[in-house]
Image (spheres, helix red, strand yellow):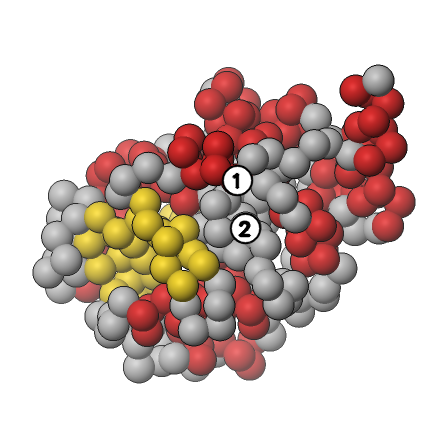
Amino acid sequence: MGRVRTLILGNKAEDIDFLKKKYGPAPSKFISILNGVNLHVRDEGDTNAPAIILVHGHTEDLHTWNKLTEGLVGKFRVIRFDLRRHGLTGPAADNEYKLESYVSDLSMLIQHLELDNFVLIGHSMGGRSSLKYTIKNPEKGNGLVLLSASGAPREQKTSPPLALRMMKNPLGRALIRRLWSRKMAKDSLMDMVFDDSLITEEEVDRMWDFSRYPGSMNAMFKEFSETWKDFESTEINEFSKNTLLIWGEEDTICPMDMGEWYDSHLLNSKLIRLQNIGHNPQFECPDKCLEEIAAWFKALE
């Protein structure tokens, strides 16, 4: 009967209190920003140290930065948060999932924390949001690190993960709602890395758990019904912030040509190519990312 129910209604939602107990212990806190979104945030390290804000990508959460945070927190104030509809932040009351909504949340968090001098490090969708924020607020921030960021025109014709392709049409979304399983969550994670042996059961559990946060799947479908326009060269040709681009050469979600496009249009950029790395450099090779970020920071001084 359980399988029949799932096929008709989809998976049963997970209990929010259970999720908060499992994924939201200290140093987690919840910050209500001006638009009413209640962000799950971790703010670690010396508050007097230079600040770094980590912005994760689609279907991720602040835990995707665990390994990178371990290497950064000794020298920096490291701030990471779950984007709207992700992790413990959950769906937004306004049910808006345009790029502008994510940029607004980031802006309001920065305002709430009273930050002026910081560096944004954004992955995938989080990279696109971070760049858009910095374009709109050129007086804010000291630089930008984009890891496999979306938003550049796509030239290389690669096939994105099956779940992402299915969400592009109503029938696919209906099938995901009814067929979504822990195995599909695992397959989705494996599609995002070059070496799928890196995907642990803990990673799979977290994606599976958060996918059943009440309302999150509906919010994800709402987001995928939106059209997010790619950047045009005219938007970024005069962008002068120092920008570090870190890209996996085996990335099939945001292929290398997207990193090359950013590098060719940004005024002060440096592109790092990582061999045998897929879409999640911060997870697949955190030590190499830390090495490149540290060298880039040193050059900023």
Q: Secondary structure at mark 1?
A: helix
Q: Residue 51's x, y, as percent? A: 22, 60
Residue 204, image x, y percentages: 54, 26
Disc 1 marks which residue?
16
Query: Which residue is drawn at the image coordinates 65% and 36% (left, top)?
Result: 13
Instruction: Determine whether, in the image, residue 70 is placed left or right of residue 101.
Output: left
Taking the image as shown, residue 150 lies to the left or right of residue 42, namely right
Query: Does the image show residue 273?
Result: no
Tell me the residue at 82%/35% (across/down): 9
Residues at badges 1 and 2 in contact (C-beta under 8 Å)?
Answer: yes
Question: Which is nearer the eye, 163 or 37?
Answer: 37
> What crowding class fits label 2: few (fewer than 14 Cα within 10 Å), some (14-19), or many (20 or more)?
many
Look at mark 2 in the image and give the residue it sits on.
90
Closer to the camera in the image, 48 or 152:
48
Q: Secondary structure at mark 2?
A: loop
Q: Is residue 11 left or right of residue 252?
A: right
Which circle marks residue 248 in the picture? none
* Residue found at x 22% / y 39%: 71
The amino acid type of the residue labelled 2 equals Gly
Residue 62 horizontal/vertical position (percent): 41, 44
Quarter of the N terminus within the rendering: top right
Res. 160 image quadrant: top right
Residue 126: x and y, percent?
Answer: 48, 56
Counting the numbered discs, the total is: 2
In the rendered image, the vertical position of residue 75 relative to residue 232, given as above or below: above
The amino acid pointed to by label 1 is: Ile
CA separation, marks 1 and 2? 9 Å
Q: In the image, is residue 71 above or below residue 48?
A: above
Is 294 rendered above or below residue 210? below
